Image (cartoon, grey):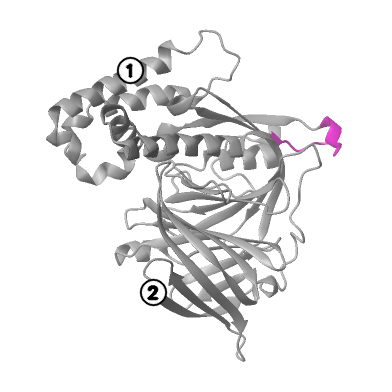
Amino acid sequence: MEGVRKDKRKGSHEIRYLVCLWVRCYISKPKHTTRPRTMASIHYSVSLHPLLKLPTHHNNNNNNTLRCFSLNPIRASSSSSSSTVGEAAMNVDNLRSFINLNMGKWKGSFYQFDSSGKLLQQVSTKLAASSYGEDELMSLIQTLYIKQPSISGDDDEAEWAEYKIKETNMFTVDKYQQIGFFPTERAFALRYQTAGMLETVLRQGVLGEDDTGEESPKNLKIPSRRPSVVCENCLYSLQSDMRARAFHILEPKGTIDMLVIFLEERSDASHPLLESSGDTKNRITPFLGKWKGHSITKRSGVYGSTIAEADTVVLHEMDDNGQLIQDVTSTSGVENVTTNVHWTGTISDNVVTFDGGYQLILLPGGMYMGCPCDIAKSVAELKSFHLEFCWLETPDKRQRLVRTYDIEGLAVSSTYFFETKL
């Protein structure tokens, strides 16, 4: 934004660029199309108008939310700098890679867990993802199908409820979803403003036609209507065309409301299932031992650049008192600086609670999700916080994705870990 205020002529170029982009959104599209209409297409038109006022905006604190159209693509069109042009092209490539990674027909299973890792609900789902547009105007369209309960119990007679997910495009991935994307590693993290999609899955998948729209249906836990954080961390399988999408849903007070896993496979096979989803014993055992790997940290946004890499060694072991010892050593790739963090945790059922106020919730299928015990306390103490998803797909290999938030609840970076067991 500094460059916009200092150069009025440059600001005029930016206005013309955004006007042209706005016109392309409406004039260049065919009048007759078979693609489904969604709320996101309406939202797209409304959201572009404030950006036309960028040259007169004087709030430096909004750089993260305006990064999508405010700087890099505009400089590429008004500057002869080859590095800037390359950066803009790279960001379009990132969006294209993200869309291609998600496209296809997915069969899945939806799992809902409470804050202690207890399985609450399981629902079969399907997801159809396609795209339209080119370059900066590319969009990802997704439709979720939710299997409704059948009275007869016959799967052939089951009905599927349809839910249109809002479009994902260059604007939404930066301003709203604050994407953290790792194209080579096939992993991403997204932010949601509501838990509407998850509520729909639960209502349609559990209640079906019996859904009365009540605030708290009997025997069904619905996400808060005003969650403080809804975070999706997605990791793709290292062995097959499968992925696990993990959702942290935090209630307004800053504690875990519920956890959700979508386990999805891009194939015509049967719906994938978590192994031993009902088993609540010894979930910590697969994680014990020494793990060696590498981490990559990127800024949030489709323009996110790599800001740090490190070699890591993580040790999980039980001491004589039955407590979990976690020892993490990280050596940065540039400064060659080594840091060590030592935590001691108490295990109760499926929850590991560390002395520093952080917890790991152990889930079936070699997964766990980590978060602070009380995010409100972290914010009150002016501390950033982290949400983690770990998937141990094989006994000797695991992936982790950690989302870092600032004290205002903005996702500032994401870190991907790949580790092997020694």
Residue 92 placement, left or right of 111: left
Residue at the bottom extreme? 320
> Is 95 a magenta residue?
no
| Residue 389 quadrant | bottom right
Residue at the image position 64 percent from the left and 68 percent from the top = 420
Q: Is residue 201 visible?
A: yes
Residue at the image position 19 percent from the left and 28 percent from the top = 10
Q: Secondary structure at mark 2?
A: loop
- Which residue range is magenta in the image? 146-157
Residue at the top extreme? 31
Rate crowding at label 2 as few (under 14), some (14 to 19) or many (20 or more) other CA atoms within 10 Å: few
Residue kind at label 2, given as amino acid type: Val
Residue 71 placement, left or right of 198: left
Q: Secondary structure at mark 1?
A: helix
The percent position of residue 24, horizontal first and vertical second, equals: 40, 16
The percent position of residue 317, horizontal first and vertical second, equals: 61, 82
- Return the residue nearer the eye: 294 or 36: 294
Instruction: Please give the count of numbered marks on the rendered protein.
Output: 2
| Residue 104 quadrant | top right
Q: Disc 1 marks which residue?
A: 20
- Return the residue nearer the eye: 179 or 302: 302
